[in-house]
Image (spheres, rainbow, N blue to C red):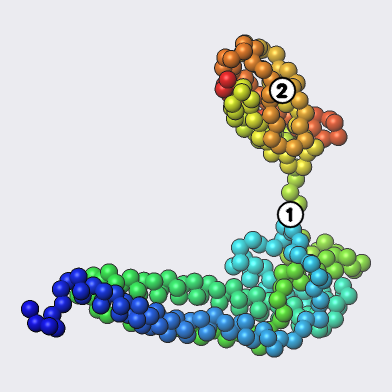
Amino acid sequence: MGASALTPDARAPKFAAHAPSLAATAIESVARAVGSTAHALNIAHHASQSAAQSRIPIQQGETLMANAYLPRDEAGQVIWYNNFQLKFATYALTIGFVAGDVTAVQNDYAMLAYTINLAAVFKEEAKERVQYKDTFLDGPLGIVTPAAPTIPTIAPPAVIPPPGILPRLSAIVQRIKAHPNYTEAMGQDMGIVGATPKPPANPKPTATAEAQPNSEILLKWVKGAFDGVHIESQRAGETTWTLIGMDTSSPYRDSRAPLVAGQPEVRRYRLRYFKNDTPLGDYSDIMTVTTIP
């Protein structure tokens, strides 16, 4: 065999020595391919560096208040905010705001719609790029070479407000409702009056019962807006319900010894809410469980 020939064992280390450079080349190519996308996604970030401050300040530590008027889905928020910014402009002067406040709300809406739509567009673009990659990797053979996905151009709003659109919205709505000229009709028109959930006429606890070692039963229950629950039980052949405890924090442990030491025991449980020491509502579904000695 000539001096330049290599055995399989000799070739392996040589190939391994080149593997890192091959991997680095591949990674560099991928980085160039996604570079434009990363640049596009940073448009809003770079633009916000020169943004003018809103006339409506955000208090330190302010968080979005719980409300029933703002949709939870982002597409619904765009639709809701569009109506709000249009109607707010018609009432602003009457309820103590100035023209600059109206402009600030309009700028917030434009940025909210832009960022939500931008994210949705690039989410779809990501799917297209995965499909493009899969086509080249998996084929099938003989198909027409697909065109490379393009980078969409989405211009940001002319004015970029500071971060905190939804906390700012909460502060605005609170200020609107606190003004003496505010009416329920205005609130309905602006979409800032949500439906107030009503408690059920006959609240019924939701609970589970789990057997634990040493004949213990673990009762987990949902407290809701009540002070606690009364816990009643039957065991073995009993037909009368016995109040075994009052609990104000789930879970509750029934640690009673079994009627017959060392033997499994069938127990039944039902719970009922109480508030201000007064029982109310319906009993929970009856839970039946067998103890583990």
Q: Amino acid at mark 2?
A: Glu
Residue drawn at point x = 76 percent, y = 52 percent: 196
Per the image, the residue denoted by label 1 is 195
Of residue 80 and residue 62, the one placed in the foreground of this image is 62
Q: Secondary structure at mark 2?
A: strand
> Which of the pair 173/210 is nearer the observer?
210
Quarter location, residue 248: top right
Give neighbour class at mark 1: few <14, some 14-19, many 20+ (Cα, 10 Å): few
Q: Residues within 10 Å of mark 2 (few under 14, many from 20)?
A: some
For residue 232, which numbered disc appears in the image? 2
Between 266 and 4, which is closer to the camera in this rendering?
A: 4
**Left or right of 4 on screen, residue 121:** right
Residue 73 in view of the camera: yes
Horizontal side of residue 231 vs 265, given as left or right: right
Identified at 64% across, 16% down, the residue is: 258
Counting from the top left corner in percent of width and height, residue 250 is at 71, 37
In this view, which residue lies farthest toward the left? 1
> Which numbered marker is on residue 273?
none
Q: Is residue 72 above or below residue 213?
A: below
State which quadrant residue 8 falls in. Answer: bottom left
Type of amino acid at the residue the image marks with label 1:
Ala
Question: Which x, y percent locates residue 142?
Answer: 20, 75
Q: Are marks 1 and 2 in contact (CB under 8 Å)?
A: no
Image quadrant occupied by the C terminus: top right
Looking at the rendering, in which quadrant would you find the N terminus? bottom left
Mark 1 or 2, closer to the camera: 2
